[in-house]
Amino acid sequence: MPYYSSYNMLCPLFSPSQEELSELKEQICLYESAVKHGVLSGEVNGGDIWENQLSDSYIDLGIKKTIWKNGRLHSTPLVEVSEPNPKLPREKEDGAVKELRSELQRCLASLKGKRQRIGQLQDQLRDSQGRVDQLQTQLDQEQTSNTAETRPMDTHPDVASQKELSRLQEDRQRLQERLEVIHHLLKILEDFSHY
C-alpha cells in the first residue's frame, strides 16, 4: 500500500514532463508539415553570418540560410511564391508566409527548450540510476546483516535484540518500497528519453 501512495505522490511531478513531451511531438509535426509544404528549405549555404548564431535546433534541422525582413529573422523559402493565388492578394500571401515563418521560429525556439529539458531529464535519470544502485547495495547489505543477526537471536532471545531486529525489518521494508518507486520512476524516465 505505501508503494501506491508514493506512486500517487510522484505522478503529478511527471505530469508537466508528459505535457512537454506531447507539445514537442506537436511542434515536430508542425515543422515537418512546413517543410513538406515548401515553407522552408533544407539547403545549406556556407559562410552565412547568421550560421554561427543559430541554435542547435536550427542547425540540426538543416535551416542555415537566413535573411532579415521587417526586423525579423527568416529562413529562405524552398520555392518562391511565383504563382499568386487569385483568391488572395500578394500582400496577404506574403503576410501569411511571414506569419508561418515566425510561428515556425517560435516552435523551433520551443523545441530547443524541450531538448534542453530532455537533457536535464536524462541527467536526472542517470542520477536516479546511480541512487537505485546505491539503495540496492544498501538493501543487500541489510539483508545480509539481518540474516546473520537472525540466527544468534533465535538462540538468545533478548528484548533489545528483538527491538533492533524489528527496526531493521522496518528499515528493510521502507528501502524495498523506495526501490520499487525508483524503479517505476526510472521506467517512466526511460520512456520519456525514447521520445
Image: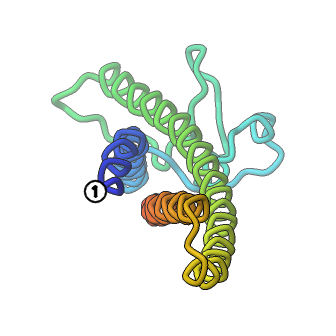
Colour scheme employed for the rendering of this structure: rainbow
Q: Quadrant of residue 125?
A: bottom right
Residue at 80% across, 40% down? 52
Is residue 43 in view?
Answer: no
The number of callouts visible is 1
Callout 1, which amino acid?
A: Met
Secondary structure beneath label 1? loop
Packing grade of label 1 (10 A; few <14, some 14-19, many >=20) is few
Residue at 60% across, 85% down? 151
Image height check: is 74 above or below 72? below
Identity of the residue furthest to the top in this view: 71
Location of the N terminus (image quadrant) = bottom left
**Which of these two is toward me, 181 or 107?**
181
**Which of these two is toward me, 27 or 179?**
179
Is residue 131 in view?
Answer: yes
Q: Tell me if 176 is positioned left or right of 124 in this view.
A: left
Image height check: is 143 above or below 105? below
**Which of these two is toward me, 29 or 164?**
164
Image height check: is 188 above or below 120? below
Residue at 60% across, 64% down? 161
Q: Which residue is mark 1?
A: 1
Measured as percent of width and height from the top left, residue 133 is found at 66, 69
Residue at 57% across, 55% down? 42
Measured as percent of width and height from the top left, residue 7 is found at 35, 51
Measured as percent of width and height from the top left, residue 175 is found at 53, 61
Identity of the residue furthest to the left in this view: 87
Measured as percent of width and height from the top left, residue 39 is found at 42, 44
